[in-house]
Image (tube, grey):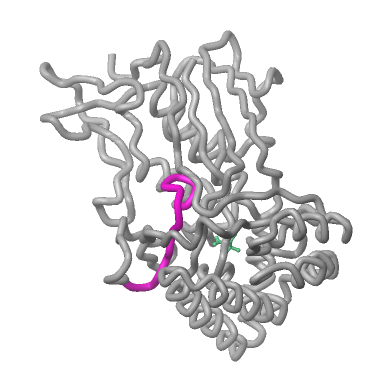
Amino acid sequence: MVQASAPGKCILFGEHAVVYGQPAVAVAIDQRMTVSLEISDVWRIDGMRFSPERHPHVESLKQRLWANGPSLSIKVNGDIPPASGLGSSAALSVAASAALRCARGRQIKDDDWGEGWTAARPNAVYTGPWDVEQGDSVQTGKDSVDVDECAILSHAVEASAQGGRASPLDSSTCSHGGCIVLSDKVESDLNWIYSRTLNDVSWEVHAVDLPKEIEDVWLVIGNTGIHAPTSEQVAKVARLLENEPGRMREIETIGIIARRGIAALKEGNMEGVGRAMRENHLLLRSIGVSCSELESLISAAAPSSLGVKLTGAGGGGCMIALTRNPKETSEAIELAGGRTLISKIAAHGLIVESDDNSPLWNPFE
Ligand code: MEV
């Protein structure tokens, strides 16, 4: 059996504005999605017949990585609530890309990739597969998995599910883990990973080394239980900006606040991080992506927190509180009717948990 897992994510700063190229920050959380694959007589997912309509992300990855491959039984487990702004679909896509890659291996040519998706080329295009020649080999198991490739594939799949508008924030955070910053330019004081371009918007993706002060704070995530598809919220903001182009100023202000938040985060100034989160929330509310249920959870968490805001697309889904008192904050949110999860900041990214019997299929034979 081949198995891979990827973390969910929380956006600390910059959701929605990032779709328009503004900087944004996300961290991987402790909650994860795990995908396991085994060869099967028919396509199944969690014991049921696989339906491409019900699982568009998996279908899209299947077409890219497993075209003409044998039927698989796919199992998906995890503790990331779906459609709640915590990156469940990106985590699923990252884990599924890794599992599929591990299960098929990778063609190697002249000691380099013979096929795959790479950020080293403009727009992260697919290279190969090249004709197999003598001397070529297939890299198998964990070694065949590449974290950037999984991020790229997950972004492509997210973008098609969101009508072409998706930043690579969720996909890169769920792949790389830790703390990820997207910006419209390469930030010299951060660790640049790669560039991504989609529909004329470009993002530079960076990792951030977090200071030790991060160890004294927690994220308490409060879930309203309201499912709000990201695509609808992203479309709502697009309509607002189309009808009232002057509102782009709010999007730009979110970018300024995100920069302030990044600086505070790097300095270990957690009070400053909390302040920037509160300011960011006011702007998200003003562009219309909050709702009364999110506002109640945010008000309940505020007295015991350094900063509170909605996280992800909004319209329902989750809020986050940065706090030194996770128990007190979590109780306050639950009393206000939310379900809570507690996470440390910046969990581990993609992990290939098992590559037993891989490759399950050799497409190059
Ligand atoms: C969703 O988690 C974050 C949004 O900014 C959309 C995106 O970045 O693609 C709302």
Magenta part of the chain = 173-186
Q: Is residue 231 left or right of residue 209?
A: right
Pick whichever, 54 or 99, lies toward us. Answer: 99
Q: Residue at x 39, y 65 (%)?
A: 203
Note whether residue 186 is visible: no
The magenta stretch spans residue 94:
no
Q: Residue at x 38, y 61 (%)?
A: 208
| Picture quadrant where residue 66 is located | top left
Q: Residue at x 37, y 16 (%)?
A: 359
Pick whichever, 79 or 149, lies toward us. Answer: 79
| Picture quadrant where residue 273 is located | bottom right
Q: Ligand 1 sits in which quadrant?
A: bottom right
Q: Is residue 79 left or right of residue 37?
A: right
Q: Is residue 93 above or below residue 358?
A: below
Residue 361: image location, x then y, percent: 39, 15
Pick whichever, 27 or 110, lies toward us. Answer: 27
Residue 170: image location, x then y, percent: 52, 54
| Picture quadrant where residue 308 is located | bottom right
Residue 327: image location, x then y, percent: 74, 54
Tell which residue pokes out farthest to the top in this image: 41
Residue 298: image location, x then y, percent: 77, 68
